[in-house]
Image (cartoon, rainbow, N blue to C red):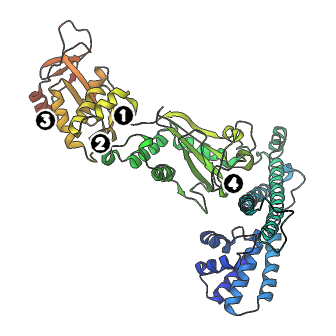
Amino acid sequence: MNDLVLYLRDLRDSAGLSVAALHDRLVEEMREQLERPPAEQTLHRRLRGVNLHIRRQLVDAVVVVCTREAGTDTEAAKEYARALFDRADVEMRPAEPAASPLTDAPDDLERHREEIRRLRRDLQAKEIENLRLVTEVTAVRQLLSSLANPHAEGPAGGDEPIGGILNRLHQLAAGAEEALAVAQAARDETARLREWLAPSAAAREEHRAIHGTSLGNEGASHDGTAADAELAYLVSQFRRRDPTGALMAEVIENTRSSIFDGGRTGRFDWNQLHRTEKALFTTIVARAMQQTFALAEGSQALDFTLDGIDFDVRYSRNNGGWVFPPELLGELCVVIHSDDGTGQFSYGVVRVTPEYLNSRLANRDMKRALNTAGRAAIRWVHQDKDFRTSILLRLDGADREAILLPTTGHQRLTELLRRAEGTPLSRDDIATVCRQPDPNRRLREVIQHLRTEGILVIGGASDDRSALARLGAPEPGPQQWVSLRLVPAGPDDPGPTVEIGGSRWRKAGPEDSEVALPTDQWLRARRTPRSTGQHPASPS
């Protein structure tokens, strides 16, 4: 393969053509051929040898274009290039497996795994070619239907336009059948090698007894499906790095915050996003995941790599709604699903194979979704874990409408802290309601105003946050605030109380009237709690 790559590079250098210029000439040269020229970025990879051994027509076209530009002998160059192509094709063929896996050395097992990876790449290329042919046949049939004359008797002659289309259709059909046969052969070979590399449990025990080592596929999935050590390793690594699911929850929360941009737009619901913003969600999730999990860039068309294992990232709001382009056939994918309505997410790993995909295309990009078997094959890292959604989604409709109805940020934030009593509010919640990227000044004003209504608001950075737990409310975390309405405690009140300004206060009930907190003493105490050692709200 290296000889062929170097020869094509020499031809291109002698012709003085850049890859972009070569691509433009290939578009014209291959116009009438069954194989279309690849995109410019793909052409870069082909000229480096990636899947070049299955692109004979592309090699011929590159030789013709370069020799024509250089003014050299085209036929001689083409003959030499075909000899190199045939040699590369032989080099890329899988070696015959040995008679028994028990007698193989570890190097032999690794060689066979490499053959499986190569066959998987070949299968992916054949699937792409097959889908392209099916699409082109469908388009030609539609064109033929529109041009056909319903009053004509018999088929159109070969010299007529429709006759030419018919001839083209027959050629495409023959090409499609050939591509299907090649793809099926590659699929069968991959299945055969997988079966050969997945010996029985008895064979594993016998090999362990003889050699003292286990066979190389004991990283197989725990659900009894075909062995896939790479998939099992990815799952184990994600579970090790994210044992509780908190890291992926952070990824989804940060992505939502970035896309919704509530401080500037006031948006909190998925339906408020533009179509292009929804399409960007997967990309931003992937980049946030790379940063949070410290992932390296992947090779070729895949997003990331972890310990040498490449994988892609797919996100969908609908569980099972992920779609996969043809270039992901045979590859590992991390699939992520989150639901704003339930506030839960799941993510796992799946190997994208033809038998796991629907036969029907999901869109014009030839992407396909997982079928029932594919969804069952997902190895979940975490399922149905909680993540933080907007408080406006968790409140009932009447409360949400009352919060959003006022025209000023001060009024909206005041109403939010009144109605979301005892619920931790994030900085995003505050910014979205205020519609200000930096709502801190507005928040300080509202906190001071709400004290006149007996509502205490404590942030996660306050030394007094433990007083909330004493009163039965959750403590705010970093960049969170909790509001709670208080009333003076009577001598016979059995519940917990806190001391504010020298008097005892308890959590207010629905029947209690509003009583203002001692604002001046509270403010004075909060300004100097560390220097005086006095806490403005101490639990009793």
154 and 346: which one is in front? 154
Inspect the image, locate mark 4, and give the three-letter code of the amino acid beneath it.
Leu
Q: Would residue 79 be found to the left or right of residue 17 on screen?
A: right
Say which residue label 2 marks.
431
**Label 4 or label 3, whichever comes before in sequence order:** 4
Whole-number angstrom distance, CA of label 4 to CA of label 3: 64 Å
Residue at image coords 58%, 78%: 20
Say which residue label 4 marks.
329
Say which residue label 3 marks.
528
Q: Are marks 1 and 2 in contact (CB under 8 Å)?
A: no
Q: Nearer the viewer, mark 4 or mark 1?
A: 1
Whole-number angstrom distance, CA of label 2 to CA of label 4: 43 Å
Q: Nearer the viewer, mark 1 or mark 2?
A: 1
Say what secondary structure mark 3 lies in. Answer: loop
Whole-number angstrom distance, CA of label 3 to CA of label 1: 35 Å
Number of dots carrying numbers: 4
Q: Nearer the viewer, mark 2 or mark 3?
A: 2
Say which residue label 1 marks.
392
Q: Is residue 535 visible?
A: no
Q: Are marks 4 and 3 in contact (CB under 8 Å)?
A: no
